[in-house]
Amino acid sequence: MQKPRLTFLLPFLCPGAKPEVATFAAGCFWGVEHIFLKHYPIKDQKGILTTSVGYTGGKEASKNPDYKTVCTGATDHAEALNIEFDPQVVTYAELVEFFYRTHDPTTLNSQGKDAGTQYRSAIFYHTPEQLKIANEVTAAVQAKHFDPIGKKIVTQIVEAGPWWDAEDYHQEYLHKNPWGYQCPTHKLHW
């Protein structure tokens, strides 16, 4: 299950703010976490407080999956990123738009050469307000960036369910291993 959040980061919150959680899947979770932390470094207090990569959105019977099992596709879990953020510094809408900027949301169950349901594009919302915002941002991104080129966003927008942190060696993998594999779609597309 989800590990406890680091309480020493709470002083970085704006006064009176409560942290919120955003959960995104956009292919290999190494690259998703890396690009978010590159543009919203925790030390720079741009709103992201903590991140963790893990597994979500799978079969109810597939509890506490590991990387090897998720990679078989048998669990239906997505490789995903959990972001704890300060909504008074960075909005959920901004994070959703950034999510769309950093991968190809028009490919079903794949990013680059990575293929399978674990690499799908998905927004896992935590509140009705997040659902509303995710739908609004998706519609705006579709109209501005994908309608003109004749492509359709296939990102799933589904309610967040159980979350399992990935193994420790996956956490901030590309920060620890800058030479490691990174999907070429994880870049700023606009």
Image (cartoon, grey):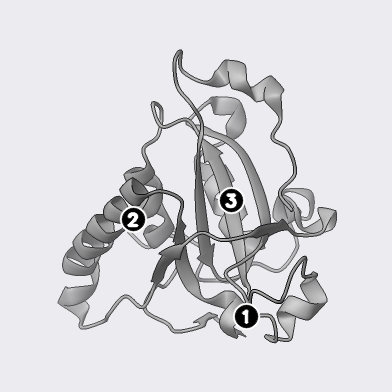
Identify residue for label 3.
82
Q: Count neighbours of disc 3 (C-alpha within 10 A) and say few if under 14, some if 14 to 19, many if 20 or more.
A: many
Residue under the image location 51 percent in, 31 percent down? 19
Quadrant (top left/top right/bottom left/bottom right) for the C terminus = bottom left
* Distance between mark 3 and mark 2 Cα atoms: 16 Å
Residue under the image location 61 percent in, 77 percent down? 118
Q: Earlier in the sequence, mark 3 or mark 2?
A: 3
Identify residue for label 1.
76
Between 40 and 68, the residue placed more toward the observer is 68
Q: In the figure, 107 relative to 135: above or below?
A: below
Q: Tag 1: residue type? A: Asp
Q: Tag 2: residue type? A: Leu
Which element type, helix, strand or loop, lies under badge 1? loop
Label of residue 131 in the image: 2
Q: Tag 3: residue type? A: Asn
* Distance between mark 1 and mark 3 Cα atoms: 18 Å
User: For residue 135, what is the image quadrant?
Assistant: bottom left
Which element type, helix, strand or loop, lies under badge 3? strand
Q: Earlier in the sequence, mark 1 or mark 3?
A: 1
User: For residue 51, what is the image quadrant?
Assistant: top right
